[in-house]
Image: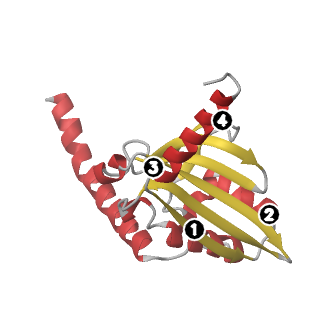
């Protein structure tokens, strides 16, 4: 093969491989009455991430930087990845690895793209979750409707959306707090004894 044909052959080989891989693409679109700047801030400000099941994202939001999704009640990160493209307030592309369960971890890394477009006095937010394997566990992408509805509610009303998942998390948080209260004296007793 000539030195001129080699790059073309490599490109075609890579394209063939990508086309043959069985992956999915999930697209979610929502309209939110806000500005692109406010929407970007809500997506990237860890303190305002209460719409996302209480998960905040720790990162410096620069291209190539790592991020972790954390929750105060979780023993470790719930998700992680890399900020692949950061173009405020229009586009954010991230690799995405779910860590919240063994089934989710087994799915490996996928990609999430956030696209913000001003439409009159509102924004169209399109979230594209792609590159999970064909038939991936719905746990990987099934929370997007609640996350986006929570984001819309937060930006339009200033309040958190009450959903079955949020209610269940609140109950779990209360149970965990009660366990800590009950166990704290036992820990102190054991340390003294």
Estimate the spatial distance between the alpha carbons at disc 4 and disc 1, rounded to whole Å. 32 Å
User: Depth-wise, is mark 4 or mark 3 nearer the camera?
Assistant: 4
User: Depth-wise, is mark 1 or mark 3 nearer the camera?
Assistant: 1
Estimate the spatial distance between the alpha carbons at disc 2 and disc 1, rounded to whole Å. 19 Å
Q: Secondary structure at mark 2?
A: helix
- Of the numbered discs 1 and 3, the one sitting upstream in the chain is 1
Q: Secondary structure at mark 3?
A: loop
- Of the numbered discs 3 and 2, the one sitting upstream in the chain is 2
- Of the numbered discs 4 and 1, the one sitting upstream in the chain is 4
Circle 1 Cα neighbour tier, 10 Å, few/some/many (<14 / 14–19 / ≥20): few
User: Depth-wise, is mark 3 or mark 2 nearer the camera?
Assistant: 2
Q: Would you say the residues marked 4 and 1 are in contact, meaning their CB atoms lie under 8 Å apart?
A: no
> Quick check: 158 above or below 173?
below
User: Depth-wise, is mark 2 or mark 1 nearer the camera?
Assistant: 1
Circle 3 Cα neighbour tier, 10 Å, few/some/many (<14 / 14–19 / ≥20): few
* Number of the label disc, if any, that sits on residue 27: 1
* Number of the label disc, if any, that sits on residue 72: 3
Q: Which residue is mark 4?
A: 8
Residue at image location 60% in from the left, 47% down from the top: 94
Q: Residue furthest right?
A: 120
Circle 4 Cα neighbour tier, 10 Å, few/some/many (<14 / 14–19 / ≥20): few
Q: Residue furthest top?
A: 3
- Of the numbered discs 4 and 2, the one sitting upstream in the chain is 4
Q: Which residue is mark 2?
A: 36
Residue 69: % across, % down: 51, 47
Q: Is residue 91 left or right of residue 167?
A: right
Residue at image location 65% in from the left, 23% down from the top: 2
* Number of the label disc, if any, that sits on residue 165: none
Residue at image location 60% in from the left, 35% down from the top: 9
Front-most of 3 and 63?
Answer: 3
Q: Is residue 181 left or right of residue 150?
A: left
């Amino acid at each position: 093969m000539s030195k001129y044909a080699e790059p073309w052959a490599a490109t075609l080989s890579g394209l063939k491989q990508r086309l043959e891989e069985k992956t999915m693409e999930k697209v979610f679109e929502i309209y939110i009455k806000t500005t692109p700047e406010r929407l970007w801030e809500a997506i990237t400000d860890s303190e305002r991430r209460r719409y996302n099941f209480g998960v905040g994202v720790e990162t410096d939001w620069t291209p190539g930087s790592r991020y972790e999704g954390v929750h105060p009640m979780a023993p470790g990160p719930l998700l992680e990845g890399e900020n692949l493209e950061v173009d405020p307030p229009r586009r954010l592309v991230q690799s995405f690895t779910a860590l919240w369960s063994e089934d989710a971890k087994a799915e490996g890394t996928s990609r999430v793209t956030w696209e913000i477009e001003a439409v009159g006095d509102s924004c169209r937010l399109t979230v594209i979750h792609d590159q999970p394997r064909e038939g991936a566990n719905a746990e990987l992408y099934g929370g997007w409707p609640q996350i986006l509805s929570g984001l819309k509610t937060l930006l339009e009303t200033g309040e958190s959306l009450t959903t079955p998942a949020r209610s269940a998390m609140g109950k779990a948080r209360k149970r965990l707090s009660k366990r800590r209260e009950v166990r704290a004296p036992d820990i102190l007793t054991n340390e003294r004894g």
